[in-house]
Image (cartoon, rainbow, N blue to C red):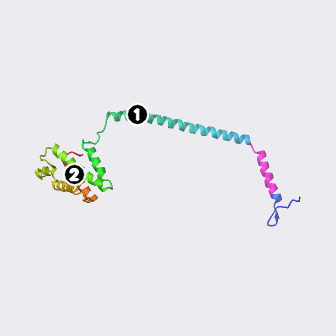
Amino acid sequence: MTQLPATISGTDVSPQLAQIFDTALNFLSNFDYHGLIVDIKTVAIILTVIFGTIFVIVIRKLWTLGTLKEELVGIKGEFNLPVEAVTAYDNRWQEIRRHVDSFVEAEWKLAVIEADKFVDDVLKTAGFVGESMGERLMLIKPDQIINLQYLWDAHKLRNLLVHDANFRLTHQQALFAINAFESVLKELAALT
């Protein structure tokens, strides 16, 4: 088999490649590997010491923070901040709010009816007299409850719902009634 000369643009490159190859071989065979390994070991030892020191410092800081956290938890236990006041009625009201926040008309109706009953119970507890909610509302003076007219409107809406099964309640009407009931409950300090 005959060897073809390596040429680039008509120039024989075989001697140039041979010279590059010889130079690379001479460099690799005469290279001071022992000195390189010593240098790499020295750099590795220095980096190990640096990172080891950083690691120890970080661990000590974390330990200090953990101890500090335990101390702060102990202090927090001594100074409990007051929890937002919750009346006995708040949970009941939240359930009514969940109904009115629904996308279902039947839930809105239930919310209005339940809220009316809730306000009636609070009015009775507050000492307002009367046999029914309507009678109690008639006996209340406007200076006793600021939002009396809104309460009347909400109660009338409740009566429509109870007495007319075909009554179509809009979400806006339900929200109006719930907000009216809520303002009266807050005025009577039944809700926070």
Residue 86 sits in which quadrant?
A: top left
Type of amino acid under label 1: Glu
- Answer with left or right where residue 150 lies relative to residue 19: left
Residue 160 in the image: state x and y as whole percent: 21, 57
Name the magenta segment's main secondary structure.
Answer: helix
Q: Secondary structure at mark 2?
A: helix
Q: Camera-side residue: 95 or 143?
A: 95
Question: How far apart, in angstroms, are the residues tagged by discs 2 and 1?
Answer: 47 Å
Residue 137 on the magenta segment: no
Of pointers 2 and 1, the one earlier in the residue sequence: 1
Q: Secondary structure at mark 1?
A: helix
Residue 23 on the magenta segment: yes
The residue under label 1 is: 70
State the mark number for residue 180: none
Question: How many marks do you count on the picture?
Answer: 2
**Can residue 185 be seen in this snapshot?**
no
In the depicted structure, whether residue 53 falls above or below residue 4: above
Q: Camera-side residue: 44 or 76?
A: 76
Residue 37 sits in which quadrant?
A: top right
Residue 50 in the image: state x and y as whole percent: 57, 39
Question: Which region of the structure is painted magenta?
Answer: 17-32
Residue 161 sits in which quadrant?
A: bottom left
The residue under label 2 is: 181
